[in-house]
């Protein structure tokens, strides 16, 4: 973004962090919990030629809830937060549901593998 006084560049890591925290808001998980490390790896940011972004999220859905509504809440929250905080347009938030689980968190085995 260019301004009279200079430029502001927002890194993909910042966009990923905003998307990640927006995702955690939907899951009702604190970003300080251990299992969130695995969830952050499920988010990818892509820049488009027209200076907007596309966000990709891979997640499990909680059993018993509408999967479509769950996905829509993720899309809406990520889009609103990125656009509000950065003024960068979000072209799309693509959510891929990979599983249905009782509680969304990284498994104990995955967490042990990361620590090694």
Image (cartoon, rainbow, N blue to C red):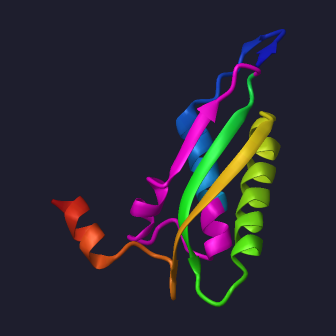
**Magenta stretch encompasses residue 34:** yes
Q: Is residue 64 above or below residue 78?
A: below
Residue pictured at 53% horizontal, 38% vertical: 13
> Residue 116's image quarter?
bottom left
Per the rendered image, the range of residues in magenta is 23-50
Q: Position of residue 73 (x, y in %)?
A: 76, 67
Q: Nearer the viewer, residue 115 or 55?
A: 55
Query: Which quadrant does the N terminus fall into?
Result: top right
Q: Nearer the viewer, residue 115 or 60?
A: 60
Residue pictured at 21% horizontal, 64% vertical: 113
Residue pictured at 69% horizontal, 85% vertical: 65
Residue pictured at 40% horizontal, 61% vertical: 37
Please give left or right for residue 60 compared with residue 6 in the image: left
Q: Is residue 84 above or below residue 40?
A: above
Please give left or right for residue 81 compared with residue 60 in the image: right
Q: Residue furthest left?
A: 116
Please give left or right for residue 90 compared with residue 103 in the image: right
> Residue 21's image quarter?
bottom right
How many labels sit on residues? 0
> Residue 76's image quarter?
bottom right
Q: Position of residue 7 (x, y in %)?
A: 71, 14
Q: Position of residue 41 (x, y in %)?
A: 44, 53
Q: Position of residue 82 (x, y in %)?
A: 74, 45
């Amino acid at each position: 973004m260019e301004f009279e006084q200079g430029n502001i560049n927002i890194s993909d890591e910042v966009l990923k962090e905003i998307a990640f925290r927006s995702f955690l808001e939907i899951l009702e998980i604190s970003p300080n919990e251990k299992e969130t490390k695995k969830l952050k790896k499920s988010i990818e940011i892509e820049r488009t030629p027209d200076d907007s972004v596309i966000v990709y999220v891979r997640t499990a859905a909680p059993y018993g809830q509408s999967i479509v509504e769950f996905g829509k809440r993720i899309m809406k929250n990520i889009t609103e937060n990125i656009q509000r905080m950065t003024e960068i347009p979000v072209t799309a938030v693509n959510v891929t549901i990979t599983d249905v689980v009782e509680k969304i968190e990284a498994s104990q085995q995955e967490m042990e593998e990361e620590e090694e």
